[in-house]
Image: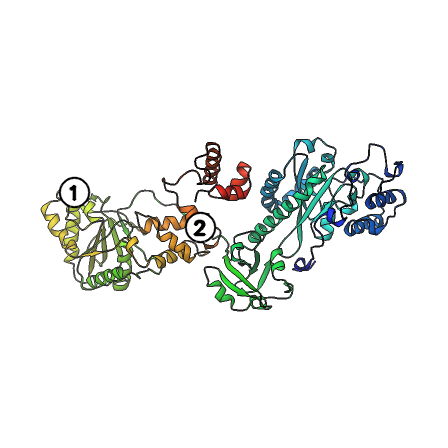
Amino acid sequence: MSVFSFCLVARRRCSVYERTGGLQTLAEMVPFPSGEGIAEREEPVKSPLMEARKSLARNGVFAHGAVPEVIADSWHRCLDLGLNATDKPVDAVLSYNLLRQARERNEALIAIVRPELELLSKQIAGTNFMTAFADCDGTVLEAIMDTEFSSSGCSRSIRPGSIWREDVRGTNALGLALFSGESSMVTGYEHFFLNQCGVSCISAPIFDSTGQIVGLLDTSSEIAARQFHTKALVDMAVINIENRLFVESHRGDHIIQFHPRQEYLATQSVGMISFSDDGAITGANRRAGDILSGIDLAVPRTFEDVFRGSFGQMLSTADSIRLVDWLNASYFARIRLTRPTRTIRSAAVPLAAKPVYAVSGSGKTHVFGDEHVRSSFRNAERALKIGLPFRVVGGPGTGRTTLLRRVHENVDPVRPLIAVDCRIAGTGGADGTLTAQTQYEAQVDTIHGDGGGTLVLEHLSAMAAPSARSLAHLVRQLLEPAAGARWLIAATDDTDGALPDDWCESARAILSRVTQMTIHLPPLSERTDFQQIAKAMMAGISPSHQLGHAALAQLEKLSRPRNLVDLETQLRILAVRCPVGVIRAEQVQRYLHTGGQQPDVCQRCAGHAVREAKCREINRAFRQCGSNVALTARKIGVSRNTVYSHIVK
């Protein structure tokens, strides 16, 4: 099968009942009594399928038109292989070591399949059933069965390690799906071998992004009527597996999700095509071929071969846009950016707080789009240029040190920028000078006046009285430097109040020179450049994530007492919780609205004691599972739709 040939495969049938025109009878669903073959029954069965079945058992031939076409073709293949319908099939089972090796080869795929297999088992109503996963060779690797099915004879045949290709087991759903590449359903006497006619099976192939079958999902039951409902569940589970496998396989590519209807962009029915950085197609899921009807995905090689417009323009768009293919069909689309995980080297660092440290350049583009902040920046820059000490006042996380670092880089980038955290700074030495260590490899015992630079006194008003005397002595020396030295001094504080009363008069007199000029910074909630700040900060945290316009608006409404510090924390939470790509408003609301005032039951269940208890259980599990709907559904044994309906908005 070529790279994208699965996109062209037609869907030829829906169910066995439809294929046979409703001619199946109850006798077709009930296996023969033990030891009694078709040829030995005294009264003939009038069903065309049973007549063909009887002829197959007696003579090895049958009327082709009496059997659904796909089943008839499979029977002919079995006869060509020399199989006899009245014989027992070979019980082909791998050894323990070979089964272990097969599982190891498919370990990554099993990790994706297993949750869907468990969920499928919970979704199938009633008893007497099993779900299984087989590899691309038709070998069952995983199986989940209920108590009734496990005690039946079928469970001894359909077990991990058993091989279900047509050349070994005759006509069966798993072997038929492996051969045809389509979802297959084989019930009762449609099986080739007589001793398999007591079970009904549904199997669907799992394709990777190149169109190759990498595994199969199978359900089997001794109750045939249930299987018509189960087929839709199996097909849905396979779509979920393929989509997740597609994303994992193309994590280093750009993935475009598209659908004719915008509300379907967040569902599993979305089409996905992956592209390299230069716009070359690297893969597509099956749904992409269905949606792009009339366009052979085996032919196009680039984005421009499928859609009108520029691939670069698509990448630069954060929210969903409209795409038009070359057949003039229109779609809604959004980009899903994926990148390999960056390796971060770890290094041992001292845990002791450092009161004095060198502030290195950030290498980031600072955002000063707010008019008030721009004015404060210009005033700070002028003050440093003429050597005037000043104090920057603003609440925690308003960017005081960041502003001073940017000003220093503009005014005097050659000299060092030293910061003193006055809350923890102490004194040392016989003369009471201020001592500490910098963040450079070399230790600095004393800050002295030689050389020059910029000194930032952080949290000046919080300094203890003994340390304030040492600091005042240092500041006086720096303000009267030796020849060739030039020190620029700035301070930061939460408020612009007076210096502490417990400081000595000399310390207050000297350090008041730093506080005579005050520059204010507004809190983040009052800045007009919030969205620019959030975008720049997210780009530094995770280049693989982008904030959509609605997400930015939703994010701006949140409370953050520590300003930029809280914003950075919230963005890191979103980068961890959200899949790579564009972050949406509903994700901001889901992952960051964790206030204590939020109710623990939804409005629909409020006031009903029994329903409230169930709703609390779902919401508690939802929070414990990190707002993961699929994981919550598997954990408490309900459907995804049930979880969605009970989530407290």
The picture quadrant where one finds residue 390 is: bottom left
User: Is 351 situated above or below 333?
Assistant: above
Task: Estimate the x, y position of residue 643 in percent, counting from the top left.
Answer: 51, 41
Front-lying residue, 457 or 231: 231
Q: Visible in this render: residue 161? A: no
Tell me the element at label 1. helix
Q: Which mark is residue 466?
A: 1
Task: Estimate the x, y position of residue 227 in percent, counting from the top left.
Answer: 69, 42
Q: Visible in this render: residue 483? A: yes
Q: Nearer the viewer, mark 1 or mark 2?
A: 2
Task: Please identify the quadrant where the N terminus is shown.
Answer: bottom right
Kind of residue at disc 2:
Glu
Task: Estimate the x, y position of residue 18 in percent, counting from the top left.
Answer: 73, 49
Task: Estimate the x, y position of residue 107 in percent, counting from the top left.
Answer: 61, 44
Residue located 35% across and 53% down the image: 556
Q: Which residue is mark 2?
A: 586
